[in-house]
Amino acid sequence: MADSNKLIIFDTTLRDGEQSPGASMTKDEKIRIARQLERMKVDVIEAGFAAASPGDFESIKAISGIIKESIVCSLSRANDKDIARAAEALAPASRKRIHTFIATSPLHMEKKLRMSPDQVYEQARQAVRYARQFTDDVEFSPEDGSRSDMDFLCRVLEDRRRKAD
């Protein structure tokens, strides 16, 4: 069991930076930043979203081959294709994490995903199970969780937690 007093630093600079207009980085720039993050003892470096683009995939793969102390992470939607792409990009990493997510708010489930809560619950469950075929270090996030029904959100998160124990 993890030390409950340990603060874990999870940095999303390399992923979130790509979402800022005019702020996209080259692979070499991402590698330089990843090296600095590791020097600063960042625990987890979310290097990108492997399924988002060939460039993101290549950057994650390159970073995975260079970073040795920090955990290298790739974001993925809760589907087999994204998860497999993340696993492929992370293959060279000595320490890797797949961070999978799915929307859990009624608005997003209905309009964005066109899925029922039971379908979203099952998709989240399957995604975590599939990601565990590639690494034991799997993180799950509920997208739009703050607008989610609290009972449903707890159901989804409690199930993911049980699967981690």
Image (cartoon, rainbow, N blue to C red):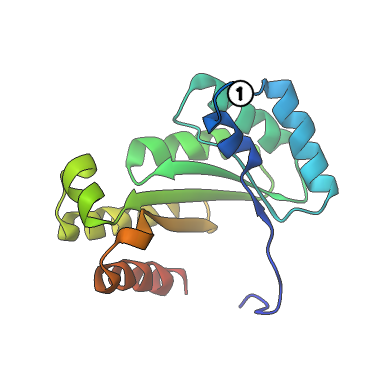
Which of the 4 image quarters holds residue 63? top right
Left or right, residue 75 beside residue 78: right
Q: Residue furthest right?
A: 39
> Where does the image place residue 3, in percent across and percent down from the top left?
68, 78
In the depicted structure, whether residue 154 falls above or below residue 112: below
Q: Residue at x 79, y 31 (%)?
A: 32
* Quarter of the picture holding the N terminus: bottom right
Q: Is residue 60 visible?
A: yes
In the depicted structure, whether residue 145 falls above or below residue 1: above
Frontmost residue, 153 versus 52: 153
Q: Amino acid at mark 1?
A: Ser
Q: Which residue is mark 1?
A: 24
Which of the 4 image quarters holds residue 82? top left
Residues packed near mark 1 inside 10 Å, few (<14), some (14 to 19) or many (20 plus) = some
Left or right, residue 145 beside residue 18: left
> Where does the image place residue 99, in percent across and percent down from the top left?
49, 50
> Where does the image place residue 149, in percent across and percent down from the top left?
25, 67
> Where does the image place residue 71, in percent across and percent down from the top left?
67, 51
Q: Secondary structure at mark 1?
A: loop
